[in-house]
Image: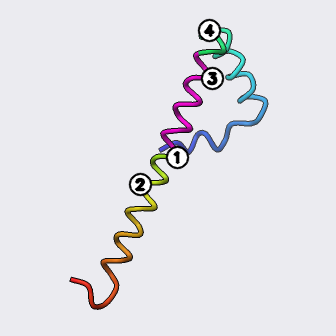
Amino acid sequence: MLDFLKNISPTELIIIVVILVVLFGSKIIVGVAKTGGETFKEIKKVKKVFTEMVKDDDKPGKK
């Protein structure tokens, strides 16, 4: 789905960030990045809990 992100060079990424900062300001960009990071952490936590639940259900002797 986001395969095009693998083809972005570091120079292109810097240019994109500079354009975003100019357009939206640094406070908004920092807020969005912080929220995205927190969301990613929460998703990883939910994935870990779900994986553990599935592994526990697969153990013999559990119903």
**Dot 2 amino acid type:** Val
- As drawn, the label of residue 41 is 1
Q: Nearer the viewer, mark 4 or mark 1?
A: 1
Q: Which residues are magenta?
A: 28-40
Q: What residue sits 51% from the left and 43% below the top? A: 40
**Residue at 37 percent of width and 62 percent of height:** 50
Q: Which mark is residue 30?
A: 3
Identify which amino acid the numbered label 4 is placed on.
Leu
- Decide: marks 3, 4 in contact (CB < 8 A)? no
Name which of mark 2 and mark 1 comes first in the sequence: 1
Q: Quadrant of residue 59?
A: bottom left
Of labels 2 and 3, earlier in sequence is: 3
Q: Say whether residue 32 is magenta.
A: yes
Indicate left or right for 8 with 43 as reference: right
Which of the two labelled residues, at mark 4 and mark 1, occupies the earlier sequence position?
4
Left or right of 32 in this view: 43: left
Secondary structure beneath dot 4 equals helix
Residue matched to label 4: 23
Q: CA distance from mark 4 to mark 1?
A: 28 Å
Disc 2 marks which residue? 46
Q: Is residue 12 above or below residue 59?
A: above
Assess whether residue 47 is covered by the magenta stretch. no
Tell me what residue is drawn at x 77 percent, y 35 percent.
Answer: 10
- How far apart marks 2 and 1 lie (CA) works out to 9 Å
